[in-house]
Amino acid sequence: MNSLTNQQQRVLSGMRPTGSLHLGHYHGVLKNWIKLQHEYECYFFVADWHALTTHYEDSHVIQESVWDMVIDWLAVGVNPGSATLFIQSKVPEHAELHVLLSMMTPLSWLERVPSYKDQQLKLKERDLGTYGFLGYPLLQSADILMYKAGLVPVGEDQVAHVELTREVARRFNHIYGREAGFEVKAEAAVKKMGKKNSKLYNELRKSYQEKGDAEALEKGKALLDTQQNITLGDKERLFGYLEGSGRIILPEPESILTPASKMPGLDGQKMSKSYGNTIALREDLDVIEKKLRTMPTDPARVRKTDPGDPEKCPVWNLHQVYSDEETKSWVKEGCRTASIGCIDCKGPIIDAVKAELTPIHERAKEFEADRDLVRSIINEGCDRARDVAKQTISEVRQVMGLEYS
Ligand code: TRP
Ligand code: SF4
């Protein structure tokens, strides 16, 4: 595995600005981000250029969606003190890396990404026979490689994009990691670690390269992580030298599959804007209560005296998300014996959703009232992200011979 272990601790993920987020996003992606932000160095960004790949004809709606989404992130507890939050197009280095990667990415790699054909079929009403749409998984690769992210939380549909990213990184390192005098430079870098560490490094390298000892490889990487006195370039050489490859400029990321949201929509299907079955995070509590009260139940329960089957009822799916065992037993028993009505059954759900959303609404109100604060959080995040991006771009230009200085 070609990766810089210390940077495996860096997490990057992006979300298309689709406007206000709903409980499906919260119980899937966002809760996961909130957990990750305490465990890793996280970069979360608004993928506004990605939105353009399918919505180039109504680009003007993207802007409001961006702010709505950011406010939702902040309201649920994505914390700008822990994670760097930014907007893709505010870090134009992403475009530069995309164009440079595009030069060495075979067309066939993009054509065989499953989402390419799938989405074209699914979104038939849009003309997705564009250059941008074909290239968007590579734009995603640029997003990821820019931060040398080790871990990329994504849904199932995006795993193939991370896989493409790994192939692109490998190809890039293969082509541009072969600098003149690599071995000599690597040997010199080994010496810079000091006597004891150099010896250990050489032993681990030998164990890995001669015997394929994977543990030695891991130990070698860990050793490199602790080195404070060598330059980034030397570190990249030493990682590559350890593994028997060239310099590793862009480490390969891994995807971490976001646990599928168990949050069902109001009709029992997956919660999704396109099904019109959502509860938005900032929706009015009275409206939500009404939606829940009127949501469909087991059709067998025409009258309150008709027994029902929770397995045939979308409300039961909501109990899976919100209710404890005791409540669930009460539902099963009460539904099957017709001793409770559907409105009774929905009571604990209504309470739980309200309790969940109340603090989110309170925080959202503060951000809605202080747009300057939201803007400054994002500006600060963009600056931080841009510092990292500039550094990567400068390295990329250097190894490609585009530095001109
Ligand atoms: N393509 C992703 C989506 O449609 C969003 C995205 C863009 C992304 N760049 C990324 C996700 C980089 C993870 C990493 O959902
Ligand atoms: Fe569904 Fe509850 Fe009504 Fe049974 S009692 S049909 S589980 S809402």
Image (tube, helix red, strand yellow):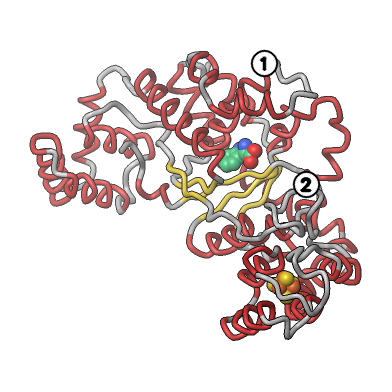
- Beta carbon of the mark 2 residue lies under 8 A of ligand 1: no
Q: Report the residue at 43% width, 22% height from top.
A: 399
Local secondary structure at mark 2: helix
Position of residue 385 measured from the top left corner of the image (x, y, whole percent) = 61, 44
Q: CA distance from mark 1 to mark 2?
A: 29 Å
Local secondary structure at mark 1: helix
Position of residue 224 measured from the top left corner of the image (x, y, whole percent) = 28, 47
Q: Earlier in the sequence, mark 1 or mark 2?
A: 1
Q: In this view of the protein, which residue sits in the foreground, 78 or 293?
A: 293
Position of residue 283 measured from the top left corner of the image (x, y, whole percent) = 86, 63
Amino acid bearing label 1: Tyr
Q: Is residue 221 left or right of residue 256?
A: left
Amino acid bearing label 2: Tyr
Q: What is the number of callouts on the image? A: 2
The disc placed on residue 188 is none
Write down the residue under mark 1: 131
Write down the residue under mark 2: 275
Q: Report the residue at 34% width, 36% height from top.
A: 236
Q: Quadrant of residue 371?
A: bottom right
Q: Is residue 30 left or right of residue 54?
A: left
Reply above or below: 146 against 289: above
Characterize the local packing of mark 2: few (<14), some (14-19) or many (20 or more) Cα atoms within 10 angstroms: few
Q: Report the residue at 45% width, 18% height from top.
A: 400
Q: Is residue 210 visible?
A: yes
Reply above or below: 220 against 239: below
Q: Report the residue at 55% width, 38% height from top.
A: 158
Q: In this view of the protein, which residue sits in the foreground, 171 or 17?
A: 17
Reply above or below: 90 against 118: below
Characterize the local packing of mark 1: few (<14), some (14-19) or many (20 or more) Cα atoms within 10 angstroms: few
Quadrant the N terminus occupies = top left
Q: Is residue 256 left or right of residue 185?
A: right
